[in-house]
Structures are given as C-alpha cells and as structure tokens.
Amino acid sequence: MGINPADASPGDVVYSKAGRDKGLFFVVMSAADGYAMLCDGRKRKTDRPKRKKLKHLCLGAGHSEYIENKLKNGEKVTNAEFRRELVEYKTERECK
C-alpha cells in the first residue's frame, strides 16, 4: 500500500520501494494528484526532480524541517542542502 496523498508533504524523507531507484532515499519537494516530486541532490537534482507515484514510496523515514521551511518560504534549496539532510539515511531499510 502506498502513501496517502494528504500525508506526503514537502520536507518528508521517503524510501523508494519500486523502480530503478529502489532502495534510495529522497526528499519530497511537492506532492499532488498521486505523485511526488523528489530530489536527492545527486542523481536527482533540484533542476530535474524525479516524479514518482506515491504508491511506490514509503513514508516515515524522517522529516527535514529545514528544507520544509525553505520550500514553504519560496527560498531556493541547493543540491548540497539536500545531500546534507540525507546523509543519515544511507542504509537500506525494509518498508512495511
């Protein structure tokens, strides 16, 4: 079962459970209509975020208030900031 669209919000750290990026962590930039725009600062940078269905993501890995506040205030978030926030989420986890 995927994520309820109302549960996904900017700044959430999610785990990809399907696709070629399976097992990787991303930060949600935005979510609407069953899809989320994801960034990790490495393969998926801020200028080309990944559009992925919410049902292929696992929510609950964590949350970045720093990125959430910057996105809500309309400030630019750099790729280095995304990488810095994802450092602690490098190990693969089992999604329930």
Image (spheres, rainbow, N blue to C red):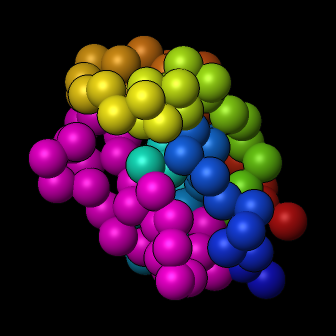
Residue 5 shows up from this direction: yes
Point out the image quarter for the C terminus. bottom right
Point out the image quarter for the N terminus. bottom right
Give the image quarter of residue 15. Answer: bottom right
Point 34% across, 34% down: residue: 74
Magenta-colored stretch includes residue 84? no
Magenta-colored stretch includes residue 35? yes
- Left or right: 8 as drawn, with respect to 70: right
| Whole-percent x, y for residue 69 in the image | 53, 26
| Whole-percent x, y for residue 26 in the image | 47, 46
Q: Which residues are magenta?
A: 30-57
Point 68% across, 34% down: residue: 63
Q: Is residue 14 above or below residue 2?
A: above
Q: Is residue 33 above or below residue 79?
A: below
- Left or right: 74 as drawn, with respect to 66: left
- Left or right: 49 as drawn, with respect to 33: left
